[in-house]
Amino acid sequence: MARRRQAVTIKHVAAEAGVSLQTVSRVIHNGPNVREAVAGRVKAAIDRLGYVPSIAAQRMGGSRSYLILALNDRDRTIEDWRQRQGTDWVDQMLLGGMLKCAERGYRLIFELVDTHSDHVEREIMAALAALQPDGVILTPPHSDNGIITRLLAEQEIPFARIGSLQPGPGMALSMDDEGAARLATTRLIELGHRRIGLIAGSPEYAISGLRVAGWRQAMATAGLPTDGLLAEGDFSYASGRSAAEMLLRAPIIPTAIIASNDQMALATLEYARHQGLNIPDDLSLISFDNTPIVRFTHPPLTAVDQPIAEVTSRAVAQIIDAQSGLAVLDTATVVPAGLIERGSTAPPRPGSPE
Amino acid sequence: MARRRQAVTIKHVAAEAGVSLQTVSRVIHNGPNVREAVAGRVKAAIDRLGYVPSIAAQRMGGSRSYLILALNDRDRTIEDWRQRQGTDWVDQMLLGGMLKCAERGYRLIFELVDTHSDHVEREIMAALAALQPDGVILTPPHSDNGIITRLLAEQEIPFARIGSLQPGPGMALSMDDEGAARLATTRLIELGHRRIGLIAGSPEYAISGLRVAGWRQAMATAGLPTDGLLAEGDFSYASGRSAAEMLLRAPIIPTAIIASNDQMALATLEYARHQGLNIPDDLSLISFDNTPIVRFTHPPLTAVDQPIAEVTSRAVAQIIDAQSGLAVLDTATVVPAGLIERGSTAPPRPGSPE
DNA sequence: CTGAAAGCGCTAACAT
DNA sequence: ATGTTAGCGCTTTCAG
């Protein structure tokens, strides 16, 4: 293998423009103390030669690497990829992250790390040592992994914790789960529903509680009771089915159900159909997350849209700002979620039980 | 921003093990000329210190970067991500590529590049200069972009062209489209079908022709005619609908249809239902690609599975081998596709028209 | 078999 | 406002 050296280096540019290396460097970084005329000459030379600085060399010189590292949980991600259930979490993350990075002259590098392994520490250190990123983006469950956050804090690397609500080092960013649940519930109330069931997610996840809270709030505000309308699931399809069964076998069944994720909503849809219930006429259904599959069910599901791209985009922006020494928000960033109305919601049948 | 320096460098390891830098370097690369005992001591020191070489420094020293760059078309990819139709091309590529890279001690970096722009050349050079990857993976339509392949060849960077059949520089890898079409057709013939329609993709893509050819071959082998059974689409949902309409409005309709991609299969499913045709009883349907959505239709679709992960995995392996000076296959690699049988295929109704 | 020296491309710190 | 110097961490010569 031939050794590959940089084709055109800062030296060539310097020679071409008739200035010193340092001046070129300053021009590249929009540094101060360069006369317009000289800067122009240098820029022209850069253009003419098609010069692009080597990240490796920049890093070696002691400056930034212009690399931001996004860390996902290895097992969960690979499992999702293998299952091919259409979850586009990673894609949305890349969409938001890569575009924002590009906009700011950075690059996003996506890596997988094993949260549960006892050598997480080593794995993270290895990634940091190898890549020397300027910042790190953590996603669940890394976001709340104390070992990881402590390590990053020690290394003084700016990092974002996506989907985390806990205080701690790093910048917390998440979607407004409570507000989203409130939004969905309120919309159903507006449509005329009074008995609105909620299928909760696993209590291990903080978001589950938030979604329940939002629903409770909206119901309370409208003066509606919630007794017998809460069923607990764990985000799995199977648990969604049991929960739906519980809600739909009650003496007085709800006219609408909100499921805390798409899998459980799918299970509810299936069970309702199996029970001879027409959606949306007999039962309105709203799901959380808005992964691609809910567009393809019959009917397509109204869903709370999880703004992953937006959250990631902001995470990148905050990291870059932090690293540039700009003011860093100390408070958690909460991104509002939207409600995408499709065919699974409608007013309740006239004369539905109160 | 505090300057971040490598915490533990090769120097520390050398000191710890009581040897020179060079010896450590040799141990890291399994170089020759190191006594067992010394190598052991060095390895122990590396472990104890948790040392990981800096990619940047390695690159600067003139060795590999251990980075492989995967290039996707910017517009198409972003559009896919925004549309959220559940296409998991990128995910499958990452799955195959990242795992194989990790296995070989490399890292995969995913980037977007604008094929159509007139400064592709510049964009690619910038990525190469900045990242200095050891190899590049091209995906359609980059794989057949002469400007890109010429550039890469000039730079003498090993690269793979995924989904390309054309000869040229770089290693061509693709799935066996012809064989896959043959497989699908043969399976339908086995089930008892004799009138099997095919909805072709856009003739601009070489794979379209291959899929048609495979179907023709299988039909010919079974002594079945194909007249009036070929409808041309362009991979879009709308074109799939027109094609289905054409096939299903003929005097004698087919008992089975193969659509050249999932979108067109979806359209066919929808149109058939609209025509009161039951799938699979009145009409069997097989689609190509096997993106996640075909699991969620009613019934779930039998589909040809496009082995993107496998193809990418092999591309990575070939690049690393090439770069290590190992023998490089000069012939194109063709990966067989599988057929995933789901609910959209069944024997034809007894007494169906011949 | 092992070590020492030179340099990769770039930047921060210090001149001028 | 610009140039010079001294590394960054590593690898590849080339000596021992």
Image (cartoon, coloured by chain):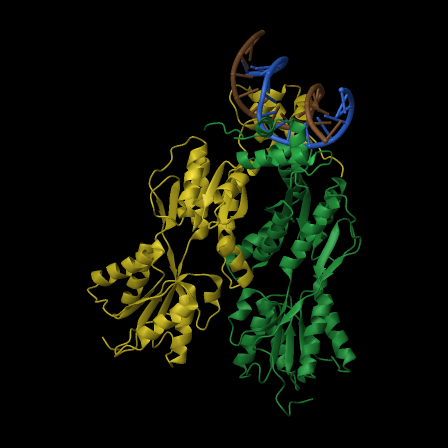
Chain colours: A green, B yellow, C blue, D brown
* Residue A73, position as x, y percentages in the image: 62, 51
Which residue sits at x=55%, y=52%?
Answer: A78
Say which quarter of the image contains residue A28.
Answer: top right
The one of C13 and B329 positioned closer to us in this rendering = C13
Q: Is residue B201 left or right of residue A15?
A: left
Q: Left or right of A82: which side holds B20?
A: right
What residue sits 69% from the left and 57% below the top?
A: A163
Residue A60 visible in the snapshot: no
Classify the position of the N terminus of chain B by image quarter: top right
Residue drawn at 56 percent across, 76 percent down: A269
Q: Which sits in the foreground, B230 or B325?
A: B230
- On the rendered structure, is B190 left or right of B112? left
Q: How many marks?
A: 0
Return the x and y of residue B258 as percentages of the image width and height: 34, 66
Residue lying furthest bottom: A351
> Where is residue A106 drawn, in percent x and y?
63, 44
Task: Assign the C terminus of chain B to one quadrant of the image.
Answer: bottom left
Q: Residue furthest left?
A: B223
**Foreground: A102 or A253?**
A102
The residue shown at (37%, 79%) is B277
Q: x and y percent of residue B274 in the render?
A: 41, 80
Residue B273 quadrant:
bottom left
